Image (cartoon, helix red, strand yellow):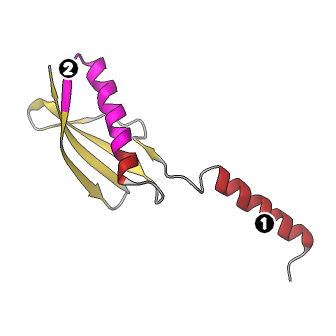
Amino acid sequence: MYSKRSLILLSISAIVFSLFGGGCGNVTNYGHDPEQIGTNENILEFSIYYNSLATVEDCDVKVKEDAEKFMKENNYSRYSILDRRNVFMPSKYVYKIEFFR
C-alpha cells in the first residue's frame, strides 16, 4: 500500500501536471524562420511543431499568425497556403505559403 504522504504527493503532482501542460495542446515554430523553396522568393515553407494533444486546427492558427507577421514585416499584401503536409518525426506540419505584394 501507499503511505498517506505518497498519495498526497501523487495527487499534487497530477494536479500540477494537468494545469501546466498536461491538458492542452501546444504548438510552436521553435523560433525557426521560414525557408525559401527553390528560386521563387515569394514561396516559403513554415514548420509548426506540435505535441500529442494539439489538433491540426491549432497548427493552422499558429501558421496563420506566423504568416501574417512575416507578411507585415516584409511588405506583402496577402498570402495563400498552397500545401500542408504532416511529418511524423519530429511531430510537425510543414506549410507551403506563397506571398504576394
What residue is drawn where x is 38% and y is 39%? Answer: 62
Residue under circle 2? Answer: 77
Residues 90 and 51: in front is 51
Q: Residue furthest bottom?
A: 1
Residue under circle 1? Answer: 10
What residue is drawn where x is 34% and y is 25%? Answer: 69
Residue 46 lies within the magenta run: no
Secondary structure under the numbered disc 1 in the rendered image: helix
In this rendering, would 79 be left or right of 52? left
Amino acid at pointer 2: Ser
Q: Is residue 6 above or below residue 53?
A: below
Percent across and percent down for residue 73 are 30, 18
Numbered mark located on residue 71 in the image: none
Which one is in front in this view, the residue at disc 2 or the one at disc 1? 2
Amino acid at pointer 1: Leu
Mark 2 → mark 1, Cα distance in angstroms: 53 Å
- Mark toward the start of the polypeptide (2 vs 1): 1
Percent across and percent down for residue 21 are 59, 51
Q: Residue furthest left?
A: 39
Q: Main secondary structure of the magenta part?
A: helix
Query: Alpha-carbon neighbours of circle 2 within 10 Å: few (<14), some, or many (≥20)?
Result: few
Please identify the quadrant where the C terminus is shown. top left
Percent across and percent down for residue 49 are 39, 49
In the figure, residue 78 lies in which quadrant? Answer: top left
What residue is drawn where x is 46% and y is 60%? Answer: 52
Please identify the quadrant where the N terminus is shown. bottom right
In this rendering, would 4 be left or right of 81? right
Q: Which residues are magenta?
A: 60-79
Residue 74 lies within the magenta run: yes
Secondary structure under the numbered disc 2 in the rendered image: loop
Percent across and percent down for residue 10 are 78, 66
Number of numbered markers: 2
